[in-house]
Image (cartoon, helix red, strand yellow):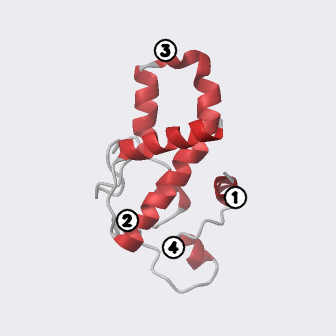
Amino acid sequence: MANIQFFIWRICHKSILTRKVLSHRGIQVDTSCLCCRNEDESIVHCLVFRPHAPSLCCGRGFPYVFTLFMNIVLDNLPKVMHILVKVLVTISPLIMWNIWCSRNKLILEDQKFVASSIIATSFVQQQQVA
């Protein structure tokens, strides 16, 4: 859990080492996203999802995990309303952490993944912490 807390702290302080952050710090690097080459690789590009492409990130199959997660929650909202706040507070950092780890595996090891497995892993981790 300490890794995830530190990761969230780094997000809040804009210190996740994306290509755009490296460039901003004076390191000569192409800022293009390694997945799509269409946009700069920023923290938002890596972790925040756009409504115009709910199932793909960068048009290359990198899942919009938060969109999928929120769709699942909204589809079942009557069932989860009484625990929604507690779950979102504890699960959101885990999902962001798992997105970041999966992004790194995709880029560094060309290892593909499924959005639903990120969500499932995050829920398992949340249960282990609780």
The first of marks 4 and 3 along the sequence is: 4
Q: Position of residue 104 (x, y in %)?
A: 45, 66
Give me the C-alpha separation between circle 2 and circle 4. Answer: 15 Å
Give me the C-alpha separation between circle 2 and circle 1. Answer: 22 Å
The first of marks 1 and 4 along the sequence is: 1
Tag 1, which secondary structure? helix
Give me the C-alpha separation between circle 1 and circle 3. Answer: 32 Å
Answer with left or right where residue 110 lies relative to residue 40: left
Q: Residue at x 51, y 38 (%)?
A: 123
Residue receiving disc 3:
79
Tag 2, which secondary structure? helix
Q: Residues within 10 Å of mark 3 (few under 14, many from 20)?
A: few
Q: Position of residue 98 (x, y in %)?
A: 50, 52
Amino acid carrying mark 2 in the image = Leu
Q: Is residue 88 above or below residue 98?
A: above
Amino acid carrying mark 1 in the image = Phe
Answer with left or right where residue 74 lies relative to residue 96: left
The first of marks 2 and 1 along the sequence is: 1
Give me the C-alpha separation between circle 2 and circle 3. Answer: 34 Å
Residue receiving disc 2:
106
Residue receiving disc 4:
19
The first of marks 2 and 3 along the sequence is: 3
Amino acid carrying mark 4 in the image = Arg
Q: Residues within 10 Å of mark 4 (few under 14, many from 20)?
A: many
Tell whether label 3 touches label 1 (CB within 8 Å).
no
Residue receiving disc 1:
6
Q: Looking at the rendering, in which quadrant would you find the C terminus?
A: top right
Q: Residue at x 51, y 43 (%)?
A: 122
Q: Is residue 102 above or below residue 126?
A: below
The first of marks 2 and 4 along the sequence is: 4
Give me the C-alpha separation between circle 1 and circle 4. Answer: 20 Å
